[in-house]
């Protein structure tokens, strides 16, 4: 969990959504210390099954599905554009194309 803790350290968020693989006490504590709410379902082997916002967790799949569709564009998946501004521009263009469908 060290990479996940390092990734969110110092960021403000109302909710942090993640899957079961990120269910660790250290990550939960860090999220709570930063004023956020962890939306992470507990792993099955835990003695204490903590509560989480099931509705917010279900909405997470909409975001994951969007990124899966976005990766259908070869240019985005392989990151042909080396300049961040060009890459972001194409991601926006691909997003608009999905929105118009």
Image (cartoon, rainbow, N blue to C red):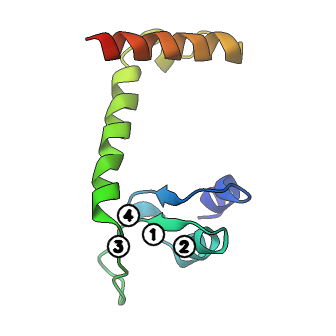
The Cα–Cα distance between marks 4 and 2, rounded to whole angstroms, is 12 Å
Q: In percent of the image, x 36 and y 17: which residue is there? A: 72
20 with respect to 84 (left or right): left
Q: Looking at the figure, which quarter contains the C terminus? A: top left
Viewer-side label of 2, 3: 2
44 with respect to 33 (left or right): left
Q: Are marks 4 and 1 in contact (CB under 8 Å)?
A: yes
Instruction: Tell me the residue that label 3 is attached to.
Output: 43
Viewer-side label of 1, 2: 2
Under tag 2, what secondary structure?
helix
38 with respect to 58 (left or right): right
Q: Is residue 82 visible?
A: no
Q: In percent of the image, x 70 and y 58: which residue is there? A: 6
Q: Are marks 1 and 2 in contact (CB under 8 Å)?
A: yes
Residue placed most toward the observer, 98 or 67? 98
The disc, 4 or 2, on the residue closer to the chain's N-terminal end is: 4
Instruction: Tell me the residue that label 4 is attached to.
Output: 20
Q: Residues within 10 Å of mark 1 (few under 14, many from 20)?
A: some
- Residue 1 position within the rendered picture, expressed as x and y whole percent measured from the top left: 58, 64
Q: Residues within 10 Å of mark 3 (few under 14, many from 20)?
A: some
The disc, 1 or 3, on the residue closer to the chain's N-terminal end is: 1
Picture layout, residue 13 above or below residue 41: above
Q: Which disc, if any, is residue 28?
A: 2
Instruction: Tell me the residue that label 1 is attached to.
Output: 23
Q: Residues within 10 Å of mark 4 (few under 14, many from 20)?
A: few
Under tag 1, what secondary structure?
loop
């Amino acid at each position: 969990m060290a990479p996940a803790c390092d990734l969110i350290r110092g960021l403000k968020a109302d909710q942090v959504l993640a899957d079961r693989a990120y269910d660790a006490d250290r990550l939960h504590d860090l999220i709570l210390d930063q004023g956020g709410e962890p939306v992470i379902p507990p792993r099955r082997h835990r003695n204490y099954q903590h509560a989480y916002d099931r509705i917010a967790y279900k909405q997470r799949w909409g975001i994951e599905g969007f990124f899966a569709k976005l990766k259908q564009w070869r240019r985005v998946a392989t990151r042909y554009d080396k300049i961040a501004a060009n890459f972001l521009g194409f991601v926006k263009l691909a997003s608009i194309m999905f929105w118009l469908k």
